[in-house]
Amino acid sequence: MKTIHNFSAGPAALPWPVRERLAEEFSLDEAHTPSIAEVSHRGPRFAGVAERLEAGIRRLTGVGDEHHVLLLQGGAHLQFAMLPMNFARGRTAAFTLTGHWGEKAFAESARITESRVIASSADEQYRDIPELGHLPADAAYLHYTGNETIHGVQFEQPPVAAVPLAADMSSEFLSRPYLYADLAFSYAGAQKNLGVAGLTIVLVRKDLVERIPDDLPQYLDYRTWIASGSMKNTPSTFAWYVAAEVVDWIEAGGGLAKLGERNRVKADRLYSVIDASDFYSNPVAPEARSMMNVPFVMADDDLTMRFVEQAEAAGMPGLKGHRAVGGLRASLYNALGMDAVDDLVAFMREFERTHG
Ligand SMILES: Cc1ncc(COP(=O)(O)O)c(C=O)c1O
């Protein structure tokens, strides 16, 4: 039986040991014991999951008492709106754009408050990380997208700016050691590196809370979630449970240092094969290349669909590029092993040999 390697950009592969835990949790017993998704979010059993998840996120991100850890719904999209509503009204929200998701965050922010792009690599088709421009004197924060999932552009380190940083970490959250404690605000959906859709992790530095205006609907006011332990209403309990299991899996495997090394090796292997070939190419400047999402194109674009279909038939689904840019994309999130990259590289070489 051949193993399927899931290269999906998200929702994405879960670690196999986590799937085993889920199978166990949801197995059917004679007593019909309720699973974790069938019990009250206010009862002791789920309280244990919530505590385990928050403590694990704090350990892995290194954020301490100066940050709130919130577990919300609505995905990164809701944060595109909540962030400016809470922290930038009456000020300017500054953005650095390195791809599609930064554009989306900026467009939403511009509906809510004065918003300005101070750096963008749009003119170079987002192939690099731009130099920061001048920050407005009343900048509330500088927003950046840690990893652009579609364009395959990643900041190695947070940008250096004299204002609070707000980062969309959706597609690289908990994939390597990172200075989360230095960010005033960061957010990420769980459905790439931390489990399943329905949970958004938000890390907010406590001093920002003073800026929140008093006229927001309760649901959109971060103070509601701080005061309720992220339980103003029923949380996505299943997604919390899966995330708690993924956190345990990360820690059991040696934590973010080990994971970051493994993710680096996976990405380097794939880029080296792309760079050594005239048949495949990746347009991003080497120092800005993503470790998580590797977009690539073939010299003959007409072959793209054939590649996608044959790869899927060979047990490698999820390699079609995003519709905004086309081409191909391999997403190499935490759950994907080195064996998956080895199989992909072997497939790419064979495809080049037969179609090049
Ligand atoms: C970097 C980034 N930001 C935002 C989003 C949107 O996330 P959501 O669907 O959770 O709103 C995605 C989704 O792929 C993403 O990769």
Image (cartoon, rainbow, N blue to C red):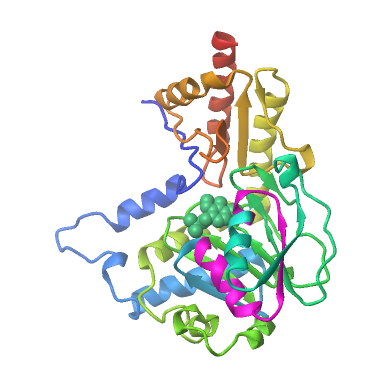
The reply, left or right, for residue 51 in relation to residue 175 is: left
Residue at x-position 61% and y-position 27%: 297
The reply, left or right, for residue 37 in relation to residue 151 is: left
User: Which is nearer the eye, 71 or 1?
Assistant: 71
* Residue 279 image point, x, y percent: 65, 18
Quarter of the figure with the N terminus: top left
Q: Which residues are magenta?
A: 76-102
Q: How many marks?
A: 0
Residue at x-position 55% and y-position 27%: 344
The reply, left or right, for residue 187 in relation to residue 78 is: right
Above or below residue 95? Residue 152 is above
- What is the residue that sits farthest to the left in this orientation? 30
Residue 78 sits inside the magenta stretch: yes
Residue 256 visible (yes or no): yes
Above or below residue 276? Residue 285 is below
* Residue 124 image point, x, y percent: 75, 40
* Residue 282 image point, x, y percent: 68, 31
Above or below residue 111? Residue 168 is above
Quarter of the figure with the C terminus: top right
* Residue 183 image point, x, y percent: 71, 69
Residue at x-position 55% and y-position 69%: 81
Q: Quadrant of residue 83?
A: bottom right
- What is the residue that sits farthest to the bottom in this orientation? 214
Residue 284 sits inside the magenta stretch: no
Residue 190 visible (yes or no): no
